[in-house]
Amino acid sequence: MAGKPKAKKDLGKFYLVVVPQECITCGTCAAICPEVFFVDKSRGYARVSYSGEEPPEKIREALGQCPVGCIHAVEVG
């Protein structure tokens, strides 16, 4: 197991989770959906900044385009 996810923000019935040990800081998620994702180069992984206003289709696209699959939508409850 790669370790505990560190970045997560509420997405309605889901949390967005970035597994820092798997993230390669490529910036794909931030390029697709900068309203939600940003690369924290000082920490070495992408992070989530979600306010609830962002379009879900862009979030799904960012999750699907992550080359290492380190971003997950985890169901709450």
Image (cartoon, rainbow, N blue to C red):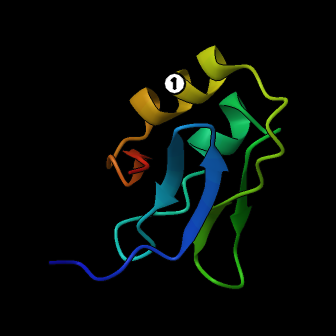
- Quadrant position of residue 41: bottom right
Q: Residue at x 51, y 24 (%)?
A: 60
Check disc 1 and report the residue beneath it: 60
Q: Residue at x 35, y 80 (%)?
A: 4
Looking at the image, residue 27 lies above or below residue 29: below
The outermost residue toward the front is: 77
* Residue in front for this viewpoint, 74 or 18: 74
- Secondary structure beneath dot 1 equals helix
- Quadrant position of residue 43: bottom right
Looking at the image, residue 44 lies above or below residue 29: below
- Badge 1 crowding class, 10 Å Cα cut-off, few under 14, some 14 to 19, many 20 or more, is some
Q: Residue 66 in the image: x percent, y percent? A: 43, 40
Say whether residue 75 is left or right of residue 40: left
Looking at the image, residue 23 lies above or below residue 64: below
Identify the image quadrant of the N terminus. Answer: bottom left
Q: Residue at x 41, y 28 (%)?
A: 64
* Residue in front for this viewpoint, 17 or 66: 17
